Image (spheres, grey):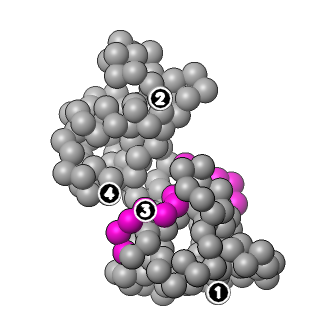
Amino acid sequence: MERHFDSSRMLGPEQQRELLRLARDSMRAAVHQEELASQGGEFGYPSGYGAFVSLHKFGHELRGCIGCLTSTIALFEVVEKMAKSAALSDPRFEPVQPEEIAEITIEISVLSPPAVVSDESQLQLGLHGLVIEFGSKRGVLLPQVATNFDWDMPTFIAQTCHKANVSLADYQAGHAKLLCFSAQVFSESSV
């Protein structure tokens, strides 16, 4: 099962910094209810990649995280939209307030296309993110979540089921589908 991020398409440091700047500008404009002029980006960005934008308050406390697994638009557009949504539309949190902006650090995860997992033994903690799908239910956990919480693979799978509101028994009985993806992860504190 080859589900690693395509190294030939990995983003360099300048592209990472530009996407982080775009995410911050998009978050700031959304919080202040301002229009963000189309950024376009000076670097060529691929389309077809999904991305998640995570907002962390004081560097570690999750404040919002929204993303998409795949897209048909350019990556810079995905990041712009997900940053706005993470700031205003994550149903787990109240919208970000203007006074919080300076306390927030942004992390971006650019995703490889997801693929169905046929053999759990090929999954690697820290490398693979997981998706559980069962009917209209879906739960996604990024690769860094398992390592941040020091989970083993069975716990990671169980937590992904929990996020999807799918019972572990339904997954184990083969009723739910497990997919994986890899991600290139970078943040304002690492670039």
Query: Where is residue 65 drawn, in percent x and y?
Result: 51, 58
Type of the residue with mark 2 = Asn
Is 134 magenta? The answer is no
Residue that label 3 marks:
62
Numbered badge on residue 148: none
Disc number placed over residue 42 in the picture, else none:
1
Q: Which residue bears the numbered disc 2?
A: 165
Q: Callout 1: helix, strand or loop?
A: loop
Q: Nearer the viewer, residue 104 or 166?
A: 104
Circle 2 — which element? loop
Instruction: Tell me the kind of residue under disc 1.
Output: Glu
- Look at the image and give the residue range highlighted in magenta: 59-75
Q: Where, by quadrant of the figure, is residue 121 drawn?
A: top left
Q: Which mark is residue 144?
A: 4
Query: Comparing marks 2 and 1, which lies closer to the viewer?
Result: 2
Is 37 displayed left or right of 129 in the figure?
A: right
Q: Could you tell me how far apart the alpha carbons at marks 2 and 1 are, in whole angstroms?
A: 41 Å
